[in-house]
Amino acid sequence: GQQVMQIPQYQHVQEGEDFTTYCNSSTTLSNIQWYKQRPGGHPVFLIQLVKSGEVKKQKRLTFQFGEAKKNSSLHITATQTTDVGTYFCACHSGGGADGLTFGKGTHLIIQP
Amino acid sequence: NAGVTQTPKFRILKIGQSMTLQCAQDMNHNYMYWYRQDPGMGLKLIYYSVGAGITDKGEVPNGYNVSRSTTEDFPLRLELAAPSQTSVYFCASSQAGGYYEQYFGPGTRLTVT
């Protein structure tokens, strides 16, 4: 099945700074989903990308899917304390399993 | 709609005990999933179901069993609990498979000592 690697594992930023997390695969992906998990909470769906080179925006969040559909990124502009949490990318599992395979996540820590 | 609900929220088990984690959804979703999340780590798929009466193994099924007798419910059974099963367990549901967003329950935090 498909696998995705996320970097960095942890990111410390000052409030107001930008943040980017990357999701990479050695194989072509059919889709990428992004989820956010607040500390002590459960993952919440943010967005899905399916097209090569796709870019989607949600307020201060920008999501990109690479031209080769092997990588994706999530960029947050001017972080706020409410952005604290872990951001996961996930892709269709493939290999006969009709579900999602999650990356290990990037933990965003914001210092006021 | 309550979405996806899970019970209990917390549980402490002794080694060798058994228990069932309950999961229910009221969105009429066909697909349901069980994940475990170890501290600071991602989600690993234990079992999933594509509809009532149909279940399949995920990445880490050993030590667990599931059943799906109705569309709404997807219980996870732990037999002979071991310390390695200490984790947070999330149930999720989706309208269909890997191209649809998943809705997660609040999780069950399980400690095996």
Image: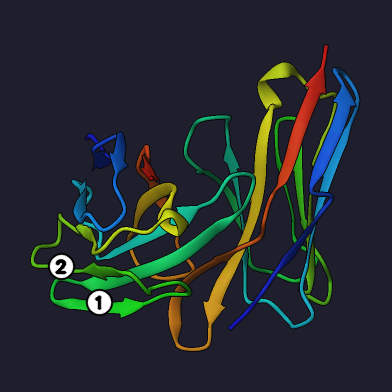
Q: Are marks 1 and 2 in contact (CB under 8 Å)?
A: yes
In this view, the residue farthest toward the top is: A112
Seen in the picture, residue A44 relative to A24 is either above or below; the reply is above
In this view, the residue farthest toward the left is: B69
Which badge, 1 or 2, comes first in the chain's sequence? 1
In this view, the residue farthest toward the bottom is: A96
Disc 1 from disc 2: Cα separation: 7 Å
Seen in the picture, residue A2 relative to A85 is either above or below; the reply is below
- For the question of whether residue B61 can be seen, the reply is yes
- Which quadrant does the N terminus of chain A fall into? bottom right
Identify the subunit bearing mark 2: B
Q: Residues within 10 Å of mark 1 (few under 14, many from 20)?
A: some
Q: Position of residue A98 (x, y in %)?
A: 43, 77
Quadrant position of residue B73: bottom left
Left or right: residue B77 versus residue A106 is left
Seen from the viewer's position, the closer of residues A50 and A11 is: A11
The amino acid marked with disc number 1 is Thr
Q: Residue at x 78, y 74 (%)?
A: A70
Identify the subunit bearing mark 1: B
The amino acid marked with disc number 2 is Arg
Residue of label 1: B55
Report the disc number at residue B83. Answer: none
Residue of label 2: B68
SS for tag 2?
Answer: loop
- Which quadrant does the C terminus of chain A fall into? top right
Q: Residue at x 18, y 46 (%)?
A: B26
- For the question of whether residue B101 can be seen, the reply is no
Q: Position of residue A60 (x, y in %)?
A: 76, 30
SS for tag 1?
Answer: strand
Q: Residue at x 37, y 37 (%)?
A: B106
